[in-house]
Amino acid sequence: MVTELLDLKNTVLYRDNINKAAQALLAGRIVAFPTETVYGIGVNANDSAAIDHLYSMKERPGNKQLAIMIAESDDVAKYVNEIPTIAKVLIDSFWPGPLTIVFMLHNDKSIGIRNSSNNVVSDLIRAANVAIASTSANIAGKQPAANAQQVIDNLGDKVDMILDGGPAQSRTPSTVVKVKEDRFEILRYGIIKEESIKRCLNESSVSV
């Protein structure tokens, strides 16, 4: 298999290339794309076989969840029945943006959700009409890719399609925050600093 590289910088072909990538997702394929932090890879979040393939390809431990990428912040309600007040404040303050929020579910499981501010991601999700189960474009434990060539260098032909939107806006990954009731815990320090999160919550009169 040869990885298909689609140039999003060509504005004439932009919409066609987004639609091609959407069809690839719906066919169970792995697609790489730029975000506002680093390049990500993802599959149809409703396709369990594609998710298993992504784990295997990335050599990712099974106990490390993939993030669910959504196009609209309101879509979080499709996955989480009760959204804590602290999470609502974070959503209003940092979404769309480089913050992954991990919500606790009733069965003691959790789900990480991200609403990226990169238009490529939201356009792709809307075109496919499915959320994307996503992770960074690298083998587990290696440096994430910051551009399309680094995706190729990291993963070779393991990725079916790459949406080349030029260099990612930052080499720093998203911040991952776990929320539970009125508390938060930073699971991964990233582009959004802890001080910014605390300041946002304090300004909203949320005790943490």
Image: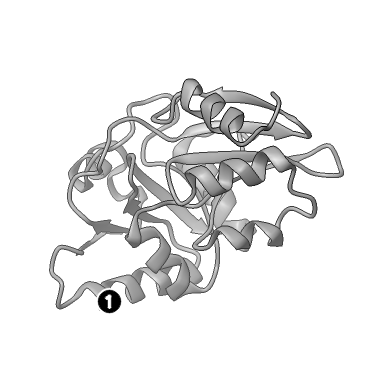
* Three-letter code, disc 1: Arg
Q: Is residue 64 placed above or below 81 in the rendered structure? A: above
- Residue drawn at x 49%, y 62% is 71
Relative to residue 187, is residue 127 drawn left or right?
Answer: left
Q: Can residue 63 be seen in this view?
A: no
Nearest the eye: 131 or 100: 100
Relative to residue 28, is residue 65 drawn left or right?
Answer: right
Q: How crowded is mark 1: few (under 14 residues within 10 Å), some or many (20 or more)?
A: some
Q: Is residue 113 placed above or below 20 in the rendered structure? A: above
- Residue drawn at x 43%, y 46% is 97
Count the marks.
1
What x and y, as percent, mark residue 10? 13, 69
Q: Is residue 17 placed above or below 191 in the rendered structure? A: below
What x and y, as percent, mark residue 120? 33, 61
For the N terminus, give its image quadrant: bottom left
Relative to residue 80, is residue 196 drawn left or right?
Answer: left
Please tell me in which quadrant of the rendered image residue 73 appears: bottom right
- Residue drawn at x 38%, y 46% is 40
For the C terminus, give its image quadrant: top right
- Residue drawn at x 55%, y 49% is 92
Q: Is residue 114 placed above or below 195 in the rendered structure? A: below
Q: Which residue does the numbered mark 1 point to in the structure image?
A: 15
What x and y, as percent, mark residue 138? 37, 36
Q: Can residue 183 be seen in this view?
A: yes
**Tag 1, which secondary structure?**
helix
